[in-house]
Image (cartoon, rainbow, N blue to C red):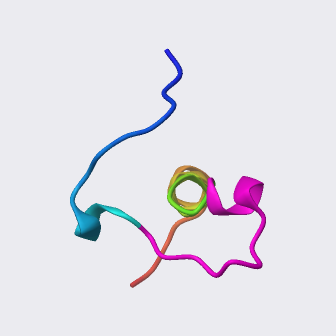
């Protein structure tokens, strides 16, 4: 279900600049993990 608000500790949030559109800010934690998963699935990553 959708949520209108949430209460979490301060360290659970990501600070973003005010000039970043909300749609972009909403993807801060999702897109990097999706990209990593795709790389791990399709590319032999070296450390």
Q: Give the image location of residue 37, x and y in percent.
A: 52, 52
Q: Residue furthest left?
A: 9
Residue 13 placement: quadrant = bottom left
So how many labels did they put on this image? 0
Is the residue 13 above or below the residue 17 in the image? Answer: above
Q: Give the image location of residue 45, x and y in percent.
A: 49, 72
Q: Give the image location of residue 43, x and y in percent.
A: 60, 62
Given residues 34 and 11, the one toward you in this image is 11
- Magenta span: 14-26
Quadrant of the image containing the C terminus: bottom left
Q: Is residue 47 left or right of residue 32?
A: left
Dominant secondary-structure state across the stretch colored magenta:
loop
Q: Is residue 6 left or right of residue 33?
A: left
Given residues 47 and 34, the one toward you in this image is 34
Indicate whether residue 20 is drawn in magenta. yes
* Residue drawn where x is 64% and y is 81% of the image: 17
Is the residue 43 above or below the residue 19 in the image? Answer: above
* Residue drawn where x is 62% and y is 53% of the image: 26
Q: Give the image location of residue 19, x and y in percent.
A: 77, 79
Indicate whether residue 18 is drawn in magenta. yes
Q: Is residue 24 left or right of residue 46?
A: right
């Amino acid at each position: 279900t959708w949520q209108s608000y949430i209460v979490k500790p301060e360290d659970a949030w990501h600070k973003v600049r005010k000039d970043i559109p909300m749609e972009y800010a909403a993807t801060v934690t999702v897109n990097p993990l999706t990209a990593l998963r795709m790389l791990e699935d399709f590319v032999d990553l070296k450390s």
